[in-house]
């Protein structure tokens, strides 16, 4: 009998389109995963910085004099 080569040639014709769409789907998913990882990493970095800032503030508050800081005065308070 005669071989039916129609489907084969259609597949051959649409292979570039199919390949491109599969590639797009793959890279979209990979980049979305990477983006999520970056966001999580940024949040950890932010948390770390804020924790350090809080520790520094706590240490400074402990070292503060009892009456608070006196205002710095340059020169006499009344003109000569």
Image: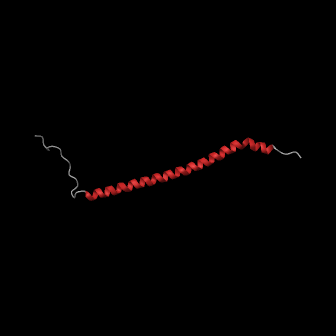
* Image: 36 above or below 78: below
Q: Which x, y percent locates residue 9?
A: 78, 42
**Which residue appears farthest toward the left when viewing the image?**
80
**Which residue appears farthest toward the right when viewing the image?**
1
**Residue visible at 45% across and 53% down in the picture:** 43
Q: Is 21 left or right of 46, judged from the image as shown? A: right
**Residue visible at 49% across and 51% down in the picture:** 39
Q: Which x, y percent locates residue 27?
A: 60, 47
Q: Which x, y percent locates residue 76?
A: 13, 44
The answer to which quarter of the image holds residue 44 is bottom left
Q: Is 40 left or right of 74, judged from the image as shown? A: right
Q: How is the image coloured?
A: secondary structure
**Residue visible at 58% across and 50% down in the picture:** 30
Q: Is 61 left or right of 78, judged from the image as shown? A: right
Q: Is 16 left or right of 68, judged from the image as shown? A: right
Give the quadrant of the C terminus.
Answer: top left
Q: Which x, y percent locates residue 50?
A: 38, 54
The answer to which quarter of the image holds residue 7 is top right
Q: How many marks?
A: 0
**Residue visible at 64% across and 46% down in the picture:** 23
């Amino acid at each position: 009998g005669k071989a039916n080569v129609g489907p084969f040639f259609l597949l051959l014709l649409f292979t570039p389109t199919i390949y491109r769409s599969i590639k797009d789907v793959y890279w979209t998913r990979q980049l979305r995963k990477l983006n999520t990882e970056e966001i999580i990493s940024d949040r950890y970095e932010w948390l770390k910085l804020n924790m350090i800032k809080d520790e520094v503030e706590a240490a400074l508050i402990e070292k503060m004099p009892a009456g608070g800081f006196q205002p710095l005065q340059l020169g006499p308070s009344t003109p000569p």
